[in-house]
Image (spheres, rainbow, N blue to C red):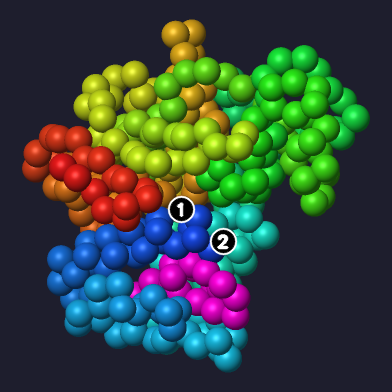
Amino acid sequence: MKILVFEYITGGGFNQQELPEFLIGEGRLMLNEVLACFSRIANIELTVMLDWRVSSFINTVGIRTVNITPEANTLNEFAGLADQCDAVWPIAPEFDGILHSLCRQVELLNKILLTSPATAVSMAANKFKTYEQLSRHQIATVATRLYEPGLYLSGEWLVKPVDGAGCLNSYLINGRQDFFEVSKKLPDKSQYIIQPHIHGKKTSLSCLFKQGRGWLLCANLQHFKLIARQYHLIEIVVNHNSDFSRYEGLVNDLARAFPDLWGYAGIDLIETAEAINVLEINPRLTTSFVGIQAALGINTCCCVLDLLKGKPIFKPQFNRSVTIKIKQDHYEG
């Protein structure tokens, strides 16, 4: 099988501008792990797109690489390479419709898409639509409304882009002054949501989905640092909790509520004594994926290929926690 892997940040999505420091580290981690996982699978011929500035720190031994220079039209290159392959795995942020457009392009080329289809991305990438769908299916979530510039309510709040990735351009509001200062920073206020700031354990689930069914690979613990009213992810403890009993029902509920989800997806949660609340659904690889092989001995890419034929086949070879340091770009077992 000929497979094109395109990680947007390292693959040329920013080939004509400065690479975003806040995204390059995680993009590099994910791409290296995807390539490592595929290298362990027989009869796979990989092609990977690489920004001209990153080729020195991506392990591409035995892999066909296509360097994307500043003169290149990255999306045209992507379409042309995708057309030469059997299957495509795009890894990209949801903002500005990037992931949706890539998935749609693969579908138009009639190639195998190794991630969720554009319809699932369109729903999950929009935090307000996700909230509405979760509420319709009575899945615990955080109360969400569209941001209104003149409507201040007392309390602690989080303002987020409706289609943001991670904590990008999200702000914590502690009072009236914060509210109006943040409001001045928002470029298009109609594209933001606001949620109460809930104090709890920030966790995530690494899952596989297919046609209304879900499988939980591991549960992860996220650590953030608050700097200038913005949360920054600093590390993830992959497989921090091997007791799946508290999450399996939720994964099944999410699979039924979002039946178009396919392949790997990450679920962001906020856990309190009262509830496990779903914050976001990421219909793509997440940084937690980087530690799964080291934590459990599970080749996630192999599991995704299994979905093309039926159910994913995976059995943990061991059971340990692995910490991914986001800033240091490495993980520790």
Is residue 311 in view? no
Q: Residues within 10 Å of mark 2 (few under 14, many from 20)?
A: many
Residue 5 lies in the magenta-colored region: yes
The amino acid beneath tag 1 is Arg
Is residue 198 in view? yes
Q: Give the range drawn in magenta.
A: 3-19
Disc 1 secondary structure class? loop
Extreme residue in the top direction: 274
Q: Residue at x 80, y 22 (%)?
A: 176
Q: Report which residue position mark 2 lands on.
A: 99
Disc 2 secondary structure class? helix
Dominant SS in magenta = loop
Residue 332 lies in the magenta-colored region: no
Choose between 145 and 167: the one closer to the eye: 167
First reached walking from the N terminus: tag 2 or tag 1: 2
Mark drawn on residue 284: 1
Q: Which residue is drawn at 24% across and 22% down?
A: 243
Q: Position of residue 309 (x, y in %)?
A: 29, 58
Residue 45's quadrant in the figure? bottom left
Extreme residue in the right direction: 150
